[in-house]
Amino acid sequence: MNSTIDRSYIEQLVRTAIRSSLSGSGHTADREPASPAGSMTPPGWVDGKPNLRVSISARHCHLTDEHVEILFGKGAVLEPDKDLYQDGFYAAKQTVMVVGPRKRMLPNVRVLGPTRPASQVELALTDSISLGIDAPVRHSGDIQGTPGCVLVGPAGTVQLEQGVIRAARHVHMNESDAAHYGVSNGDMMQLQIASPSCSVTLEDVLVRADPSAKLEVHIDTDEGNACNLDAATELVLKKSGCKCKDH
């Protein structure tokens, strides 16, 4: 259930956002730099086989064209700052403040491009707790019936009636990757992460197959911290129920 935030408080947030808009500090949603794909091999493949990448997707939001103009000014468009690993997607220079019930907020939440038909905010569980929002685990784009929030930019505010989710873990892959692993779009996979202190197995990794995609698993900040991803010594992705091993 959404809470109403008083207008004077929103105006105060807008002024704060304007003062900080030139700094542009904040985290991008993808810690990994982009890599070019070879033209003679499937996207992302190295030495004739898929090159598995696991990335932490930090808190971020997707916006509609309309909301970009409301938040950043008439005629505003998203300005690419850093290309993400998936071709055509990028972290924008713009950030927004996300405001939840009882005036709790997260400043400098990165906007990802390109724009979408519906605005959406993706958080980790700890982010949701901090904001006081009971965000459900959903696949990206499935926002019907989800909680809303207020977005604050340097030029205005947007009241989202729905769209705040905890993104379900998933793996992007192309048709060659899918054939290699014996899976199809919509299937579930398993990711095993071995690290010196806290090896984990993540179930229910949704396959999102697209001809132009490169093999990349997205997990959120909480999951990445829980398995100490930065110190991982082995990554194994396999079809759920499969006993095979493929790095």
Image (cartoon, helix red, strand yellow):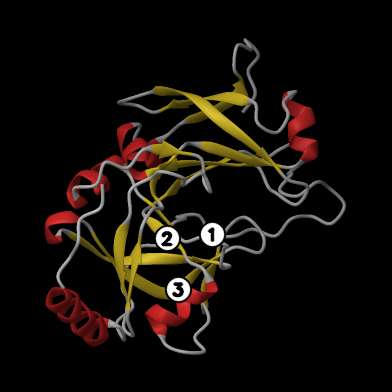
Q: Is residue 92 above or below residue 127?
A: below
Q: Looking at numbered disc 2 in the image, what kind of residue is underneath it?
A: Cys
Residue 61, numbered circle? 2
Residue beneath the point at 57% across and 62% down: 117
Q: Looking at numbered disc 1 in the image, what kind of residue is underneath it?
A: Pro
Q: What is the C-alpha distance between the residues marked 3 and 2? A: 11 Å
Task: Name the element at disc 1.
Answer: loop
Q: Looking at numbered disc 3 in the image, what kind of residue is underneath it?
A: His
Residue beneath the point at 36% across and 36% down: 223
Return the residue at label 3: 67
- Mark 3 and mark 2 residues within 8 Å of each other at the beta carbon: no
Residue 33, numbered circle? 1
Q: What is the C-alpha distance between the residues marked 2 and 1? A: 19 Å
Please tell me which of labels 1 and 3 falls first in the chain.
1
In this rendering, would 86 be left or right of 80?
Answer: right
- Mark 1 and mark 3 residues within 8 Å of each other at the beta carbon: no
Residue beneath the point at 46% across and 89% down: 74
Please tell me which of labels 3 and 2 falls first in the chain.
2
Residue beneath the point at 66% across and 64% down: 88
In this rendering, would 233 be left or right of 11?
Answer: right
Q: Residues within 10 Å of mark 3 (few under 14, many from 20)?
A: many
Please identify the residue farthest to the right as the structure is shown. 40
In this rendering, would 230 be left or right of 63?
Answer: left
Quadrant, the C terminus: top right
Residue 157: where, in percent of width, then height?
31, 75
Please tell me which of labels 2 and 1 falls first in the chain.
1
Residue 122: where, in percent of width, then height?
40, 51
Q: Is residue 135 above or below residue 30?
A: above
Q: What is the C-alpha distance between the residues marked 1 and 3? A: 28 Å
Task: Name the element at disc 2.
Answer: strand
Q: Residues within 10 Å of mark 1 (few under 14, many from 20)?
A: few
